[in-house]
Image (cartoon, helix red, strand yellow):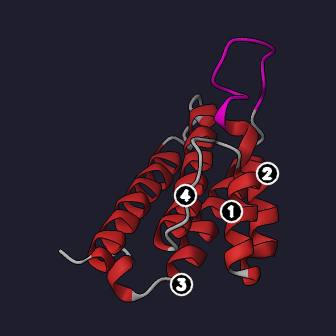
Amino acid sequence: MSPAELLARETREWLLKAADDLGSGRVLEAPGHEATALYHCQQAGEQSLKAWLTFQDQAFRKTHNLKELGDACARLDPSLTSLADEADALTDYAWKLRYPGAPYVVDPQELEAMLTLAGRILAEVQLRLPPEARLT
């Protein structure tokens, strides 16, 4: 397998993870699971941005910070700047609802907006990839 094929394959693996988490978020939209759905939105956004960086052969550190990842993506493709700025809204869901502490009530509109945002991030990344690196 050529280096380009390996890169496309690794990119698709990130996209598959993103699509899986986005699907999980949609399944978990049901009452009582909204916090976990938001976590999966964050994961989908994170993995989508990491897919773009992977395809660009750009190293990134282990992080859940979508501001950091989005800024790195926007440096490679300035047309991603606005979306990268929006993606930061997902960052806190990596931890905010995952640990004991003050209760957080998820607003249904908030969840729908974050599902939409995570889906847009995945879609926009895929639009910038050649067919061999996209999900089929």
- Per the rendered image, the range of residues in magenta is 94-105
Q: Is residue 102 above or below residue 78?
A: above
Q: Residues within 10 Å of mark 4 (few under 14, many from 20)?
A: few
Q: Residues within 10 Å of mark 1 (few under 14, many from 20)?
A: many
Circle 3 residue: 127
Q: Is residue 36 above or below residue 104?
A: below
Circle 2 residue: 89
Secondary structure beneath dot 3 equals helix
Q: Earlier in the sequence, mark 2 or mark 1?
A: 2
Disc 4 vs disc 3: which is toward the camera?
4
How far across and how far down the image is residue 103, in percent? 78, 18
Would you say the magenta stretch is mainly helix, strand or loop? loop
Circle 1 residue: 117
Q: Residue at x 70, y 64 (%)?
A: 72
Cα separation, mark 2 vs mark 3, equals: 22 Å
Disc 4 vs disc 1: which is toward the camera?
4
Q: Residue at x 42, y 58 (%)?
A: 14
Q: Identify the amino acid type marked 1.
A: Leu
Secondary structure beneath dot 1 equals helix
Secondary structure beneath dot 4 equals loop
Circle 4 residue: 59
Left or right, 73 with respect to 59, comes to right
Secondary structure beneath dot 2 equals helix
Q: Earlier in the sequence, mark 2 or mark 3?
A: 2
Foreground residue, 110 or 84?
84
Disc 2 vs disc 4: which is toward the camera?
4
Residues at circles 2 and 3 in contact by the CB criterion of under 8 Å? no
Residues at circles 1 and 3 in contact by the CB criterion of under 8 Å? no
Q: Residue at x 50, y 77 (%)?
A: 126
Q: Identify the amino acid type marked 3.
A: Leu
Cα separation, mark 4 vs mark 1, equals: 24 Å
Q: Is residue 122 above or below residue 130?
A: above
